[in-house]
C-alpha cells in the first residue's frame, strides 16, 4: 500500500501492486508480443524513475498498463479510453489513468508531468529498438547500439509505421539528447532481455 497525494492535497491509500497490475494485464492481453512490449516500456519507466529519483513502482505500473486495452480495442476511438475506464473501475489513482491517456496524441490529453513525458518518450522507441534487434544476426538486444538505431531510422522502409519525428520529439520532451535516450532505453531493456526473448 502506498499513499498518493492527488489534486488539492487530498490523500488516498491505494494498492499499487506490481503483481495486481500484471494480473490485470494478463486478463486483457493475450498477445505475447503486446505483453513483451508492455514489459519493455515498464523496464524503461523503472529505469528512468531510478535515474531521476522518482517512484519506481508507480512509474513501472504506468508503463506496464499503458496499452491495457489495445488488443481488444485498437481503434483511435477506443484506445486508450477503454483502458482508462478499466483502470478507474479497478481503483487506480487518476495520476495513473491520466498518464495512460496522455501517451497517445489523439486523446487530446496534454502531457504535463515528467512521468507522462517519459511514457511517451519510451513507448514507440521500445518497439523500434526491438525491430532493430530482430534484424541483427543473432536477434539479440546485445547487438543493438545507438548507431544501429540511427541507421535504421534513416531507412524509410524499415518499421515504416514508426514516426521518426515522434521518436525525436519524445527525447526532447524529457530533456535528453536523442542518442542518450536511445542508450538509456537499450540499457533498460537489456535488464529484461530474457523476458523479451532478445
Image (tube, helix red, strand yellow):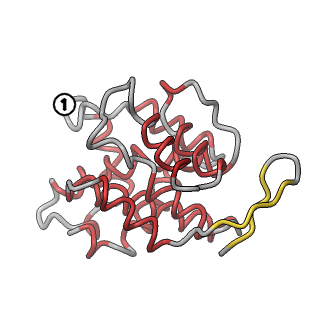
Q: Residue at (57%, 24%) from the top-left corner?
A: 108
Quarter of the figure with residue 190: bottom left
The residue lying at 44 percent from left, 74 percent from top is 19
Q: Residue furthest front?
A: 89
Foreground: 148 or 135? 135
Q: Secondary structure at mark 1?
A: loop
The picture places residue 2, in percent across and down from the top left corner, at: 69, 72
The residue nearer to you, when weighing 102 against 93, is 93
Q: Residues within 10 Å of mark 1 (few under 14, many from 20)?
A: few
How far across and down, in percent of the image, does residue 93 sit?
64, 54
In what quadrant of the picture does the C terminus appear? bottom left
Q: Is residue 92 above or below residue 194?
A: above
* Residue 147 image position (x, y, % from top left): 35, 52
Q: Is residue 55 left or right of residue 122?
A: right
Q: Residue at x 58, y 61 (%)?
A: 59
Q: Is residue 6 left or right of residue 124?
A: right
Q: Which residue is mark 1?
A: 157
Spot the residue most to the right. 9
Image quadrant where residue 83 sits: top left
Residue at the (75%, 61%) spot, across then down: 12
Amino acid at each position: 500500500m502506498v499513499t498518493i497525494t492527488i489534486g488539492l492535497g487530498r490523500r488516498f491509500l491505494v494498492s499499487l501492486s506490481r503483481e495486481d497490475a500484471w494480473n490485470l494485464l494478463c486478463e486483457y492481453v493475450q498477445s505475447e508480443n503486446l505483453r513483451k512490449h508492455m514489459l519493455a516500456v515498464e523496464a524503461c519507466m523503472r529505469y528512468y524513475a531510478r535515474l531521476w529519483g522518482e517512484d519506481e513502482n508507480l512509474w513501472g505500473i504506468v508503463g506496464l498498463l499503458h496499452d491495457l486495452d489495445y488488443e481488444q480495442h485498437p481503434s483511435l476511438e477506443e484506445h486508450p479510453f477503454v483502458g482508462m475506464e478499466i483502470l478507474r473501475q479497478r481503483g487506480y489513482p487518476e495520476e495513473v489513468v491520466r498518464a495512460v491517456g496522455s501517451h497517445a496524441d489523439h486523446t487530446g490529453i496534454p502531457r504535463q508531468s515528467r512521468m507522462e513525458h517519459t511514457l511517451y518518450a519510451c513507448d514507440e522507441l521500445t518497439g523500434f529498438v526491438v525491430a532493430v534487434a530482430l534484424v541483427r544476426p543473432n536477434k539479440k538486444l546485445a547487438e543493438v547500439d545507438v548507431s544501429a538505431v540511427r541507421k535504421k531510422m534513416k531507412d524509410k522502409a524499415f518499421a515504416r509505421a514508426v514516426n521518426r519525428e515522434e521518436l525525436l520529439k519524445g527525447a526532447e520532451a524529457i530533456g535528453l539528447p536523442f542518442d542518450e535516450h536511445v542508450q538509456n532505453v537499450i540499457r533498460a531493456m537489456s535488464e529484461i532481455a530474457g523476458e523479451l526473448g532478445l
